[in-house]
Amino acid sequence: MMDYEVFKEVVKEKILDYLPEEYRGASVDIESVNKINQKLDALQIRPSGRYVIPTLYVNDLYEDYKRSEDLQTILQHTADSFAEVGRGIAVTPNDLDMEKIKDNVIMVLVNQEQNREMLQNVPHRPFHDLAVIYRWVITQNEEGMGSVVISNELSERAGLSEEELFQHAVENTKEMLPVKICPITEILMGIGSEEEELFEMLDLTSEELEANLSNMIWVITNTKNINGATSMLYEENLHKLAEKVGSDLYILPSSIHEVMAVSVKLAPPEELLQMVNEVNMCAVKLEDRLSNNVYHYDKDLRKVSLAIDAPVQRLDGKIDEQPMFYNGEPKR
């Protein structure tokens, strides 16, 4: 079996042999890129004149190879995926007009500590242990969105400051990805393992949850259920929910795609913090993890803060050399 470095070189050398004629003469590169919560090797195949290209990750391909050791099939499947996705994201030069960024920029929440290196190269806005970053939606259809993270270089080319990106993104995200808040009991048939595990750890039945609002778990996301954790930034919706529940809220970051909210009467924050940590590390994929913290929404002050002044915990389980606290000493 090839080791990873040899596998990368073989993929780079052989992949064009499996692609359609239109890819003949295309450039092939494998570039280390910062993705959410991790760094991956991106396989990039660029035909002449193509402005936006699909990206597949060699790390994932290698995992498939370790399971099957069938290099030919993996290369063929990879080529087929490139060709299929490439046809769906055909983009003209007009689609890349810098003037269009402000009308198509949305915001996404990521973890600060886990994405420290990436944040050095992108406009962002801190939000406790999280950060708001921006994506430019280039294509959008019934199958989803095609978008790219806005880098410092791209924002400078567009002549947009971080403040301007934020103002546009607040309005665009609300319009393109409307906030959705619903009781978890309404989506039990389709919940992911992370929500199910948290539900079980609270040791409450559906009937008990429905008995009164102070026991209810609420899911906060958007209508597309993608990058929905950003919906917690729209304070007016948190306020309406808190008023409905009749108390302050604890917000539990189940993934980058959604957060959950519960009444502060349901459980102490220390217990919720432990559950969030356990669910993150056992049931949520690394690329989907948002935070190991719990947040408190004060319905009278109308403000979100950290529920507990806890040390930073990396989302990949690694231990930092020096401890760091969010609201007190010591800090890095």
Image (tube, rainbow, N blue to C red):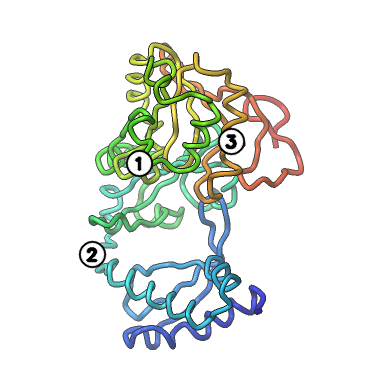
Identified by mark 3, the residue type is Asn
The residue pinned by badge 3 equals: 292
Direction from residue 38 to residue 332 in the image, left or right: right
Between tags 2 and 3, which lies in front?
A: 3
Direction from residue 94 to residue 130 in the image, left or right: right
Secondary structure of residue under mark 2: helix
Quadrant housing residue 26:
bottom left
- Rounded to the nearest angstrom, the CA distance separating label 2 from label 3 is 42 Å
The residue pinned by badge 1 equals: 164
Quadrant housing residue 301:
top left
Neighbour class for label 3 at 10 Å: few (<14), some, many (≥20)? many
Quadrant housing residue 235:
top left
Neighbour class for label 1 at 10 Å: few (<14), some, many (≥20)? few
Find residue 115 and report its horizontal and vertical position in percent.
56, 48
Identified by mark 2, the residue type is Asn
The residue pinned by badge 2 equals: 94
